């Protein structure tokens, strides 16, 4: 377990920007702790990071756990510094006890032994159900550590299916749910399978070049240049690929990502079937989406919103000029303010 301290400028937060105006107040210290926790399955350990104000413990209602998407780990998106400050830093500086978790096969969490074999040697690894099990292990760890009965949970992309399916079965452990780029049933037909295509393997290999192309997919050419802040893509890619100890053994470096999510997508979302029932979610829910998200287009967020029939209240926010990765882009502060507005509100419903 390691600890480190970070300096965050409150003046930047008040100004609503990461840019560095001179500090107007004493800068708060954040304490950061990295921990490996048991998943509940033999040999599988999960990486959990926690950040909070060093000066005091947050109140029981200010605890947030973040889980990542289908390809990249949580740490390099949620805790990537942009001009010195990550999204995780910003939330922790608002008095939150903030956690992130990598499910098995991602980041610093245990990679199943099959990931050291050729992809074709095994069936797809880490289904949404398995990932939800790992999220549950992290939730239970935090509940026990903080001696609380509920926490806030946020998922991104595939993480929305992980956290949404988990919440639908464990509403008693979730206070509020945030779904960033929600995954739902696809309207467009899936691409036809290539003739004599081999069976889907245990995992896939991802290059930095393909990641950049995916990030900018669907963004108009005249909007691409200033979408990602200078240096951010390279910093993110270098940090992300560095989490995979096998990536540097190939030229160019290749990141391993499990294929259980791809199999689930083919069997459910692309096949017109729901993997789980959002109608079983009975906690306040926020959907955050960006208008240029080519991975999970706006119609999916809108359709998902309609399925939240038993949430006490729900909200769908469409952010302008952003992609699937808006949390790391020029409009990231829109994301932050909408997120905090939802988490901070105490009495959103009028008295009867």
Image (cartoon, grey):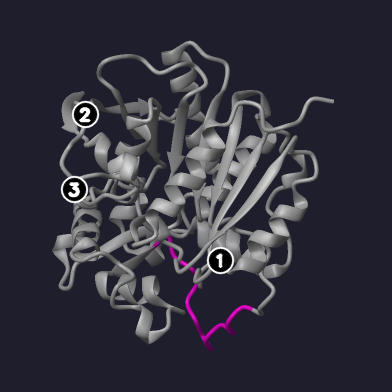
Q: Is residue 258 left or right of residue 56?
A: right
| Separation of marks 3 and 2 at Cα, in angstroms | 13 Å
**Quadrant occupied by the N terminus:** top left
Residue 297 among magenta residues: no
Q: Nearer the viewer, residue 119 or 163?
A: 163
Of circles 3 and 1, the one toward us is 3
Q: Which mark is residue 139?
A: none
Of circles 1 and 2, the one toward us is 2
Q: Outermost residue, top direction? A: 147
Q: Quadrant of residue 101?
A: top left
**Residue 202 location in percent, x, y?**
42, 59
Q: Secondary structure at mark 2?
A: loop
Per the image, the residue denoted by label 1 is: 296
Per the image, the residue denoted by label 3 is: 20
Q: Which mark is residue 25?
A: 2
| Disc on the earlier residue, 1 or 2 | 2
Residue 196 among magenta residues: yes
Q: Secondary structure at mark 1?
A: loop
Q: Is residue 246 left or right of residue 343?
A: left
Q: Secondary structure at mark 3?
A: loop
Q: Main secondary structure of the magenta part?
A: loop
Residue 268 in view (yes/no): no
For the residues labelled 1 and 2, say whether their Cβ atoms are less than 8 Å apart: no
| Separation of marks 1 and 2 at Cα, in angstroms | 41 Å
Q: Which residues are magenta?
A: 190-203
In the displayed structure, would residue 143 be above or below residue 101? Answer: above
């Amino acid at each position: 377990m390691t600890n480190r301290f970070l300096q965050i400028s409150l003046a930047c937060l008040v100004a609503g920007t990461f840019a560095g105006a001179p500090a107007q107040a004493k800068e708060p210290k954040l304490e950061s702790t990295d921990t490996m926790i048991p998943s509940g399955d033999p040999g599988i350990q999960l990486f959990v990071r926690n950040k909070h104000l060093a000066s005091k413990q947050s109140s029981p209602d200010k605890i947030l756990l973040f889980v990542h998407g289908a390809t990249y780990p949580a740490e390099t998106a949620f805790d990537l510094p942009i001009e010195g400050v990550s999204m995780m830093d910003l939330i922790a500086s608002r008095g939150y006890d903030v956690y992130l978790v990598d499910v098995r096969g991602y980041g610093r969490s245990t990679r199943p032994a099959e990931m050291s074999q050729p992809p074709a040697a095994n069936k797809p690894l880490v289904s949404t159900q398995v990932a939800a099990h790992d999220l549950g292990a992290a939730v239970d760890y935090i509940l026990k550590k903080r001696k609380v009965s509920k926490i806030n949970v946020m998922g991104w992309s595939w993480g929305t299916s992980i956290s949404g399916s988990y919440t639908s079965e464990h509403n008693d452990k979730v206070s509020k749910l945030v779904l960033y780029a929600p995954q739902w049933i696809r309207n467009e037909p899936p691409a036809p399978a290539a003739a004599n295509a081999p069976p889907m393997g245990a995992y896939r290999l991802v290059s930095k070049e393909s990641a950049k192309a995916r990030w900018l997919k669907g963004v108009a050419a005249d909007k691409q240049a200033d979408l990602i802040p200078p240096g951010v893509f390279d910093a993110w890619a270098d940090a992300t690929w560095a989490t995979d100890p096998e990536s540097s053994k190939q030229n160019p470096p290749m990141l391993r990502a499990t294929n259980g999510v791809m199999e689930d997508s083919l069997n459910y979302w692309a096949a017109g079937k729901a993997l789980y029932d959002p109608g079983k979610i009975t906690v306040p829910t926020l959907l955050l989406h960006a208008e240029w998200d080519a991975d999970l287009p706006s119609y999916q967020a809108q359709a998902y919103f309609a399925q939240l029939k038993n949430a006490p209240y729900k909200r769908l926010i469409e952010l302008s000029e952003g992609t699937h990765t808006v949390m790391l882009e020029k409009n990231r502060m829109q994301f932050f303010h909408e997120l905090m507005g939802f988490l901070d509100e105490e009495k959103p419903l009028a008295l009867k």
